[in-house]
Amino acid sequence: MQNGKIGVTTENIFPIIKKFLYSDHEIFLRELVSNAVDATQKLKTLASTGDYAGELGDLTVHVTADAAARTLTISDAGIGMTAEEVDRYINQIAFSGAEEFMSKYKNQNIIGHFGLGFYSAFMVADRVEIVTQSYREEAPTVVWSCGGTPEFTMTERAEKRSRGTDIILYLSEESAEFADQSRIRGMLRKYCRFLPIPIACGKVQEWKDGKYVDTERDDIVNDTDPLWTHNPADVTDEQYREFYRKLYPGSDDPLFWIHLNIDYPFHLTGILYFPKIHNNFEIQKNRIQLYSNQVYVTDSVEGIVPEFLTLLHGVIDSPDIPLNVSRSYLQSDGNVRKISGYITRKVADKLQELFNTARADFEGKWDDLKIFIEYGIVTDEKFAEKAEGFMLLKNTAGSYFTLAEYRDKVKENQTDRNGTVIYIYTDDAVGKHSFVRGAEEKGYDVLLMDGQLDNHFVSWYENKEKGCRFVRVDSDVAERLIDKETNMSMSLSSEQQDIMRPVFESQLPTDQKIFYNIAFEAMAPTDAPVTITQDEYMRRMKEMAAMSGGGMSQFYSQMPDNYTIAVNANHPLVIDILGEVENEYGEKLKTINKKIETAQKQQANLNELIKDKKEADLTEEEKQQRDDLAKKVDDLRGQRTARLKEIGAGNSLVKQLIDLALLSNGMLKGEQLTNFIKRSVELIGK
Ligand SMILES: Nc1ncnc2c1ncn2[C@@H]1O[C@H](COP(=O)(O)OP(=O)(O)OP(=O)(O)O)[C@@H](O)[C@H]1O
């Protein structure tokens, strides 16, 4: 019997560890089971080199929970330890590792995962016992026991254990949950799922006589030969899919996958899957699992894989990723950065290869793939460089183009007078159909940009390719989407526009949150009579502010939406309306127009007369005259506007044209829509 004091120089660290590790206490199981697996593999190595000549036998690691005794036992048939080894590895090394942890802890740079190894048993146990028999048969069986103080006992046991080690945890009262077999099995499935030695937890159960009963067979919780450790050349597509289903039960099949396999300059294997992304991509994040030699480490991989790849699923296994350190340390670690760069490159190469060798297939997957690629492009410069070769644009006809192809396609017809190539797009091909059709009738191509990240991509691309600009198809009337030299002439004179403006204003929808202004546009007589557009620049400002949050976004979100009611000044119906209005106003319109004209002429004459005088030099009479004339013009125009509004309000054709424009924008709803339908029926009846 040996009594001793563990080789720790710090004061008693057990209670501190217990207290501070509470949040992550499940990892004790991973640590103890992987020690058992290591010991087993060491034995296999010795056997393979001929240093161990005995029978290997069944090497399964058994994890046994005993709720009645409140114990948890991890048993292996590995190399075991001699008394001298227990002293060296447990009393000295294991505890000095723990001590090192404590000193790091004091410097506050440990958060997240730590490898306390064997020592972590004391997070959940009041007392830990080791019963171990070395593979050297002459060595006696050793029993080591420690009750959560630096004192331990070590004795030789007369009754010999078979080769291997039991770690027996006498669980503390608050850790009683770990004596529950189903709880333990759940933890093993998470942390030990792909360990290379079979791990049994209880027996396989069978349905017999109306209840489940244990069979003789061990319930093996792990897959000792996970797919990522295989040679990619030997794996079939179906095996990849099957493995995916195993990792993410209930998910749709992945779009495709990349099998990573590298030896230099670091070791890394793994399989990354491109999942089908549904509506909310935030919840799809963080589903890559990180392993170190098949030991589960974490499923939060930020900092290890580039941000945009956190959307991928799958497994990465690398012994070169330091596991037992904090996340901030991980991110600054050179190895980790290299790994991240490597994965990005691999993913980009794979996408390029798919595009090159199977473009039709690639295009078929594009709609699902786009979000990864756009995410990568806008967040990762290196990836963006590579992605130029396979980033695709899709038009409303359903054809796909690379960035270079598309530019070539539209360059000739869609370059404006400043030499900028204009890319026209819609976020809603169905809802904005009349705009799309209008642009197409002008011979323009329209892109479909309805993805969650398209806005970001558009900004990124405009910034990179200075000679191009995106405009949404409903940001202006088709005629003016691309500013070309050949402008159409306008049928309405500016006086006629002055008459028509109040007529249309009288029929504007009254919505507090939307601000409308009227503009007369020179368009083809066959274009729509009225179109409602939203300025590209203003819309983007609002969208950007809404996304960035904070004070700016508050300011913008309170601003009304700005729409333009573009009246086609060359449309026969519009010209008809002008005729109707003039007719209804009758002689009085001519009279008042004349009066306004006269007053304006007088104003102009007066202004000419006094234009060289300073304000202070004006006579009282001149000032009076000027004010009177201004008032007169205002009054007359006011009178005319009031009358025009009255006439406009009674003109159901004006209302009808505005409503039709609202309708084609999907903006006619509720009572307005009901009224529109009623009015339409009445108009048809006429
Ligand atoms: N089940 C076991 N069988 C044989 N030796 C063991 C067993 N468990 C622990 N040991 C020995 O005790 C040593 C210390 O274990 P501990 O888990 O503290 O550290 P480690 O495994 O070396 O490192 P890590 O921090 O990665 O777990 C091991 O290196 C091993 O030599």
Image: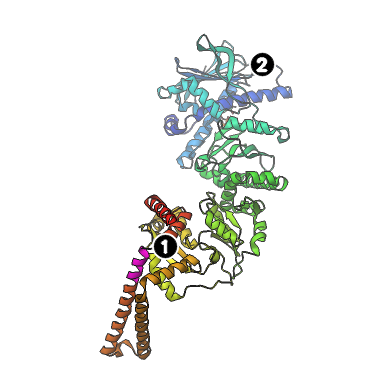
At 49% from the left and 21% from the top, the residue drawn is 182
Q: Is mark 2 within 8 Å of ligand 1?
A: no
Whether residue 645 is in magenta: the answer is yes
Tally the marks: 2
- Mark 2 highlights which residue? 57
Q: Which residues are magenta?
A: 641-650
Q: Which of the pair 318/412 is nearer the observer?
A: 412
Direction front: furthest residue: 686
Tell me if 303 is positioned left or right of 545 in this view.
right
> Can you tell which quarter of the image residue 638 is in?
bottom left
At 49% from the left and 38% from the top, the residue drawn is 112
Helix, strand or loop: magenta stretch: helix
Foreground tag (2 vs 1): 1
Q: Which of the pair 588/430 is nearer the observer?
A: 588
Q: Which of the pair 156/164 is nearer the observer?
A: 164
Q: At which x and y percent is residue 19?
A: 41, 32
Q: Secondary structure at mark 2?
A: loop
Which quarter of the figure is the C terminus placed in?
A: bottom left
